[in-house]
Image: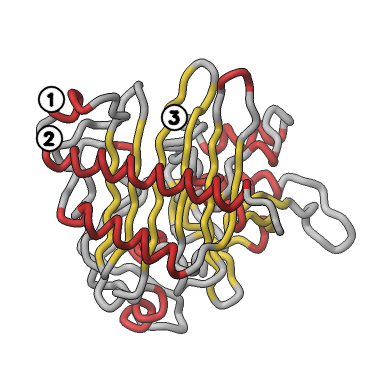
Amino acid sequence: MDPSRQPTALARWQHLLEMVDVDQLRHTHNRVSAKFRHGEHNGQRVSDLTKKLKNHKVQIDDITPLVCLRWNQVVWVICGNRRLKALQDFAKSQPGQGNTFHRPIRVKCLVHPDPKKAPPELIAKFLLAWDTTCHGMKASIRGRQPSSEHRVPSSQDPDEALRIYNPKAEMFWQAKPGTPDLEDRPRFTSIPGENDEFYVRYYVGHKGKFGHDFLEFEFRPDGRFRYANNPTYKNYAMIRKECHVSSAVLGVLRQIILDSEIMKKDDNHWLAPDRIGRQELEIVFEGEHIWFSTSKIGTLADVQASKDPEGLRVFYYLVQDLKSFVFSLIGLHFRAKPL
């Protein structure tokens, strides 16, 4: 969801990338901490980033895109409030043009245009983190104080905001303990009233001295299929494929998921992601949503040696089936010659 925490997020949400004027962005927080807590600026002070921008040691285009939500024609920053604070302070220091107070500063943002279609974890974070008292116009540098009441836009009461933003308000959050990089990616096990949704995403990769080597693909409810393969061997270029598949193809994929019984499993005792690599499997199926993560699995011996060999074996064979399905689909679709 947040490119500063998840390297694959930018590639996944690339289609939402916009250049937005800093003056048009709004904070969801009333206060932000003085130091960055994660990402490329981890441990640095917000004021230090402002100084680097002023001294041209950091370019605006180099800043990781902010994650935003457009609501009632206003763009709210969900992830990146400290970066926005630094950018606002930098903008104020720039000389104006004409009747403006400063030159327009445009920054890269991943803007989700429709709250009803935005990822539920993004909506939940927006609602839970909201504590602005000035309609997001500014944020002060201070440690955030716990708030007994999460404020929502003045035009809506909290209950109405939940109905507008998050029809999945009764989801049950289960953050995976002991995994810092997943703290901001809650997993939920129940999505009432959305049995018609179907979504599958798989990722496997690792970061080494040659860069980020990964493979990722996803199937969306509307039939959109996307595939990306970034091999670092001999500096090969990233391979991207995208197409729309029929309901019959999605039906076969549904049957594969159903036969595997993966929805009955959990990853609490699976091998944790490590330097060898990382695997992620996200599925929305029949009102259930799972998001599993584990290390790269070399052989069935690794599965048998784990704390949950039965569950990990189901995952292992399902991944093999999904890969075979995807590679066959790509071969049929992109190598077929028209008559």
Inter-mark Cα distance, 1 to 2: 7 Å
Mark 2 is surrounded, within 10 Å at the Cα level, by few (under 14), some (14 to 19) or many (20 or more) other residues, namely: some
Which of marks 2 and 3 precedes in the sequence?
3
Which residue corresponds to mark 1? 305
Q: Quadrant of residue 97?
A: bottom right
Mark 3 is surrounded, within 10 Å at the Cα level, by few (under 14), some (14 to 19) or many (20 or more) other residues, namely: few
Front-most of 250 and 296? Answer: 250
The percent position of residue 29, horizontal first and vertical second, equals 44, 58
Q: Secondary structure at mark 1?
A: loop
Amino acid type assigned to the residue bearing label 2 in the image: Pro
Can see residue 2?
no
Q: Secondary structure at mark 2?
A: helix
The percent position of residue 26, horizontal first and vertical second, equals 56, 62
Q: Quadrant of residue 150?
A: bottom left
Mark on residue 36?
A: none
The percent position of residue 285, horizontal first and vertical second, equals 29, 64
Inter-mark Cα distance, 3 to 2: 39 Å
Inter-mark Cα distance, 3 to 1: 38 Å
The residue located at (36%, 70%) in the rendering is 197
Which residue corresponds to mark 2? 309
Which residue corresponds to mark 3? 43
The percent position of residue 260, horizontal first and vertical second, equals 22, 52
Q: Quadrant of residue 297?
A: top left
The residue located at (73%, 31%) in the rendering is 56
Quarter occupied by the C terminus: bottom right
Cβ–Cβ below 8 Å for labels 1 and 2?
yes
Name above or below for residue 337 compared with residue 120. Answer: above
